[in-house]
Image: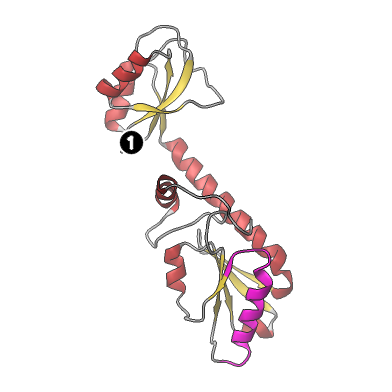
Amino acid sequence: PHQTSWGMSTRIIGAIIMAHGDDNGLVLPPAVAPVQVVILPIAQHKPGVLDKAEELRARLSKTVRVKLDASDNSAEYEMKGVPLRLEIGPKDIENNQCVLVRRDNREKTFVSLDELEAAIPALLQSVHDGLYQKALARRESMTYTAASFEELQDIAQSRPGLIKAMWCGDEACELRLKEEAGVTSRCMPFEQESLGDTCVCCGKPAKHMVVWGKAY
């Protein structure tokens, strides 16, 4: 989308930073990035480079959130998590092309200037998909299943992550899980899994599959 019209809580912002950031700073999903593409002119003192960079900024501003920066400081935008970096220099202009660099994996792509309106949205979507799949794989690798209270306690104490377990729906069981295992209900998925017939806490018939976890 060209603009975002909804606000984000500090908790969501924190989750984005923790889920996608790396040792070099932020890695922002394109949909929420204030700047989706930053244009960096290379050898900007050469005739025509800044003019071409501004021409591209004006073109791209119709479809994406774009910024032109003539300070030649690519590290700043890597730290800020801008999804795509567009580099344009004298040789690129001569060849009617530019270099697009993805923030998530630093992959470089040479793209014809005539194809930018199609190439940039496709690359932004690829960044989105890559971030989602990486985060999903990490979550799945840190999600465990408990069939008994003792197993849930052991997982909660020894492995960071989430625990799927059946629950009878009784608040007393939820309180016991909090007090004795140190976990609280984090989510009750719409798509329920049947992990067993009985509550992990009291052994009575289970009504829901719940994802439990510690609050940090």
Q: Is residue 114 left or right of residue 35?
A: right
Residue depicted at x 33% and y 22%: 152
Most extreme residue toward the right, as rendered? 114
Give the quarter of the figure containing the N terminus: bottom right
Residue depicted at x 50% and y 62%: 103
Q: How far from the left and from the top, in percent, is residue 66?
A: 58, 68
Q: Which of the two residues, 131 or 180, is positioned nearer the viewer here?
A: 180
Residue depicted at x 39% and y 32%: 162
Residue 50: name its quadrant. bottom right
Q: Which of the two residues, 19 or 172, is positioned nearer the viewer here?
A: 172
**Residue wearing tag 1:** 160
Q: How far from the left and from the top, in percent, is residue 140?
A: 46, 36
The answer, for residue 205, to whether it is visible in the render is yes
Q: Is residue 21 left or right of residue 172?
A: right
**Helix, strand or loop at mark 1:** loop
In the image, the segment drawn in magenta is 46-66
Give the quarter of the figure containing the C terminus: top left
